[in-house]
Image (spheres, helix red, strand yellow):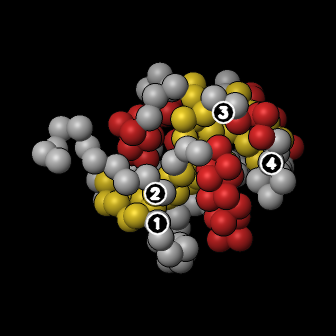
Amino acid sequence: MPIEDFAFYIKERTNGRVAEIGVGFNFKVALKVKELGLDVFVVDWNKNAVEKARELGLKAYVDDVFNPNLMLYEGVGAVYSVRPTPEIVKAILELAAKLKVPAYILPFSLDEMPRGLKLENYKGLAIYTTEKFKHPLKKR
């Protein structure tokens, strides 16, 4: 269950533009999302992380998820985060709600997630989502 499998999960659930919130210096998922053909950009408050992402060929922006620049997120179909620190999870969910798009969160294994999120097991990854997803190949 490599962390890059999260990229396939995202690809199966959205198309178009997606944003990774709080990328830090872990670019594996964003690079794989890009490789899979989605228009992805990453955001972080850390200017050094944003610069490194740009060096790797990712679109990257400095933004504060607690006071986001909503114009930056125009046209996104979803937001996601890979192992966010617990204190920013609520802000990520609030951003998704403002944008009216689903949020997908891959937490550290012991991090507690807010109530009301749906937990999905995807190839051994515990992913929390605001979306009530039904796989198109499964009977409804």
Q: Which residue is mark 1?
A: 117
114 left or right of 124? right
Quarter of the image where one finds residue 99: top right
First in sequence: mark 4 or mark 1?
4
Q: Are marks 4 and 2 in contact (CB under 8 Å)?
A: no
Residue 54's disc number? none
What is the quadrant of the N terminus in the image? bottom left
Task: Say which residue appears at 34% left-offset and 49% top-offset.
Answer: 133
First in sequence: mark 2 or mark 1?
1
Nearest to viewer (mark 4 / mark 3): 4
First in sequence: mark 4 or mark 3?
3
Residue 58 position (above or below residue 67): above
Q: Are marks 1 and 3 in contact (CB under 8 Å)?
A: no
Residue 68's disc number? 4
What amino acid is found at the position of numbered circle 3 in the picture?
Phe
Residue 129's disc number? 2
Residue 5 seen in the current view: yes
Estimate the x, y position of residue 108 in percent, counting from the top left.
Answer: 52, 67
First in sequence: mark 1 or mark 3?
3
Q: Secondary structure at mark 3?
A: strand
Q: Secondary structure at mark 1?
A: loop
Estimate the x, y position of residue 68 in percent, counting from the top left.
Answer: 80, 48
First in sequence: mark 4 or mark 2?
4
48 left or right of 111? right
Mark 2 closeness class: few <14, some 14–19, many ≥20 residues within 10 Å = some
First in sequence: mark 3 or mark 2?
3
